[in-house]
Image (cartoon, rainbow, N blue to C red):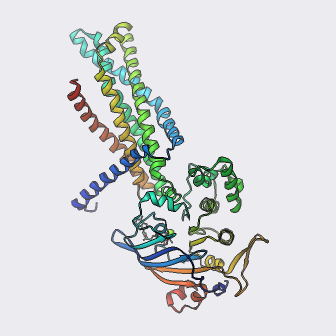
Amino acid sequence: MPDPAASNGHPQPSEVMLEFKDVELGFDQHLVLRGVSFRLHRGETKVVFGVAGSGKSVMLKLALGLLQPDHGTITVLGQDITGMAEQELYQLRRNIGMVFQESALFDSLTVEENVAFRLVEEHVSPEEIRERVTEALRFVELEHTLEKFPAQLSGGMRRRVAIARAIITHPEIILYDSPTGGLDPITSTTIVELLIKQRDVYQTSALMVTHRLQDGFTMATHCYDKEKGQMVPVKEGRENTRTSFLILRDGKVIFDGSGQELARSTDEYIREYIS
Amino acid sequence: MPFVDPEEAIKERVLAVQEYSQLSGEAVANLFRKPRYVADMLTQADFIGVGSLPIVILTGLSIGAVLALQTSSTLQQFGVTTLTGQLVSFSMIKEIGPVLTSLMLAGRAATGMASELGSMKVTEQIDAMRALGTDPIKKLITPRVVATVVMLFFLSIISDLFGLFGGYIVAVSLLGISTRQYWTSTYQQLQFADVFQGLIKPFFFGLIISTVGCYYGFSTKGGTQGVGRSTTQAMVAASVLILIFDFFITRFMIGVFGR
Ligand SMILES: Nc1ncnc2c1ncn2[C@@H]1O[C@H](COP(=O)(O)OP(=O)(O)OP(=O)(O)O)[C@@H](O)[C@H]1O
Ligand SMILES: [Mg+2]
């Protein structure tokens, strides 16, 4: 396992892209999030860990305004989205990409139409759409599947199409919900490499939910090498992948910090979690 | 079965009615807002209109034929079988054409909408659409409402016509009524109020079918089983509402036009 300490310190204090302040949310008397606070800075990738049911997906949906919190405030790109009207949220969401846990591709549309969805909605010209869809699909190495339907793809391919759909407009923030969930280690690595490429080529800020510790550590210890066209380990103490970690437990943030801090943590639960 | 608190149950119903009204109101209000999804409307119109044509023609023909048989046996007692055409056209145009077509469409289109949108709901496709910055009510519900209302209007007319034709076949072949006698009696007594009543009904029924189908689709919870449940509920709710509204519209029309 790579040494998580190789990720190099805190992100520099910079523009806050996304902020949760004391966010609470419950479903039928059952509190899922009980006072979650954190900040995501420009260019930062925050890897979110937590056992199944700890509220990770709910947290991402809150960040998009798909759900509204019971208490607390959520600020996205400088705008307070708590209590914001749905019509205003549609505008704001155009700057955010989301990859759903189960991909959530439109199953009545082809891969091409799925990826092009946002551009069609924005009335981009057909030639440009074609070009950008091909580019986005090439990014995820699926340019030969244009005419296929989601049902004809494997789980890993669907995940990559979902990534292409989320990144096609180069949003400022991307929310990845378990992009490697249920996939074999080799496909998972391909997907993590894509996320690293997206982060390093376009400098996007991201929240990445994952069950696989290894994915998080790979994010923190690798960067994308444009010449080689693949990810390479960062040289110790030289580059900063601006990756931090956040651990949710029982609806609370029990850890929020860099890989080094995570490796040094003495909390028993965290030690057990990362071992 | 677990005990259900009646107060909770009532609250739930009230909330559902409120949500339903809100959703329908917004779907209709979207007609006046951009963007309008014309292509989606045409796709739906094709599915609802053209796709329902065979079943509507079939029911129209057979009901018209049966009506002719039934009424003629009564009319025979008074020796006025020549009025068969008139009774067929009255019942077909004012009542049976619109109601039966709507009930058919409740079985075909409302369930189709509930299951399609319900599957999209449980696989998070609706959330994905919202996440991509598109209003699912505008993109999915409004086109279905428009397509259903417009198509049901024409389907009802088609059903009426085939009903009259079905009655005609029976009248001529089995009842010994002449072609001229039948057709004259069908339109002779027909007034504006009758036709108007027959045409206003599908408008309301179309609204009911589409909004109920879409509402049950959008409020689907709990996986595939939930989709099945909403589909059945959509069919039952739409049919019941059609029958209730039919009574009140008829009563209102009689109040206004006196027939
Ligand atoms: N729409 C909903 N209605 C009711 N309860 C919900 C809903 N969405 C989530 N929950 C509840 O919230 C809790 C957290 O769910 P969430 O999907 O966020 O978990 P998660 O951390 O993403 O888990 P996993 O790692 O398995 O994806 C669960 O207990 C779940 O039952
Ligand atoms: Mg989840």
Kindly identify the residue that appears in the image at 65 percent across and 79 percent down.
Answer: A241
Q: Is residue B53 above or below residue A72?
A: above
Q: Residue furthest right?
A: A227
Quarter placement of the C terminus of chain A: bottom right
The answer to which of B158 and B4 lies nearer the viewer is B158
Kindly identify the residue that appears in the image at 52 percent across and 58 percent down.
Answer: B128
Q: Is residue A164 above or below residue A70?
A: above
From the top left corner, tell me how far across and down residue A149 is, in percent.
Answer: 62, 51
The answer to which of A136 and A184 lies nearer the viewer is A136
From the top left corner, tell me how far across and down residue B201 is, in percent.
Answer: 33, 32
Kindly identify the residue that appears in the image at 71 percent across and 85 percent down.
Answer: A238
Question: Splitting the image into 4 quarters, where does residue B32 fall?
Answer: top left
Q: Is residue A70 above or below residue A112?
A: below
Question: Splitting the image into 4 quarters, where does residue A272 fall?
Answer: bottom right
The reply to whether residue A186 is visible in this rendering is no
The reply to whether residue A8 is visible in this rendering is yes
Image-based side of B77 in relation to B97, left or right: left
From the top left corner, tell me how far across and down residue A80 is, in percent.
Answer: 44, 69
Image-based side of A246 in relation to B76, left or right: right
Q: Is residue B138 above or below residue B257?
A: below
Quarter placement of the N terminus of chain A: bottom right
The answer to which of A56 and B115 lies nearer the viewer is A56
From the top left corner, tell me how far across and down residue A245 is, in percent.
Answer: 56, 81
Q: How many marks?
A: 0
Kindly identify the residue that appears in the image at 24 percent across and 16 percent down.
Answer: B74
